[in-house]
Image: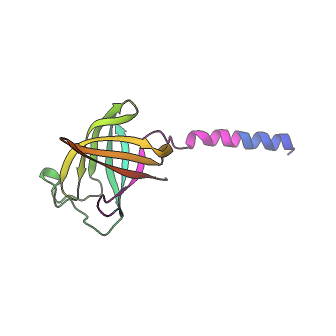
Amino acid sequence: MNLNGLAATLLLSAALALPAAADTSSPLGKWRTFDPDTGTAKTVVEIAETGGKLEGTIIELLDDGETTCSKCDGNRKNQPLVGMVILWDLTPDGGKWSGGTILRPANGKMANASIAVADGGAKLEVTGSKGLMSRTQTWERVAD
């Protein structure tokens, strides 16, 4: 193969690989969460779109802590954390997603939620608020 043929092959290969690259401006995908008090990695949450709204489901536990939602109320009480939806009903709001709800399994409490992609798609700013109080956590994107 001559040099021009090799260059054309490499360019075509690169062009075909581009669509497979992750959209770093999107919150869709897998995110590593951290304990807000200790900073240790806690879970991997997968964010997916359903009916124009986002929801986040725990798909992996990263520590030796609880494996069920012992502090939750209602139908989540004592249910396994893996497979549990902890973030739901987020809708597009300019450059972020808001209007949703987040559950903190460690204490069973729920709060209003909004999320925004940051740091070129490597991080997700997740804010939970109740009344005048709010708390923002930074989640890190997990490569597939």
- x%, y% of residue 27? 41, 42
> Is residue 51 something that shows in the picture?
no
In magenta segment, residue 125: no
Image quarter of residue 132: top left
Q: Residue furthest front?
A: 132
Numbered marks: total: 0
Residue pictured at 23% horizontal, 56% vertical: 105
Residue at position x 50%, y 43% in the image:
120
Q: Quadrant of residue 93?
A: top left
Q: Residue at x 31, y 64 (%)?
A: 38
Q: What is the magenta range? A: 12-38
Horizontal and vertical percent for residue 135?
28, 48
Q: Residue furthest left?
A: 74
110 or 1, nearer to the observer:
110
Q: Is residue 24 left or right of residue 11?
A: left
Up/down of 91 relative to 84, above or below: above
Q: Is residue 10 visible?
A: yes
Asked whether residue 33 is drawn in magenta, I would say: yes
| Image location (x, y in percent) of residue 2 | 87, 44
Looking at the image, the residue that sits furthest to the top is 94
Residue drawn at x 26%, y 52% as measured from the top left: 84
Give the residue at the far right of this rendering. 2
The colour scheme used to paint the residues is rainbow
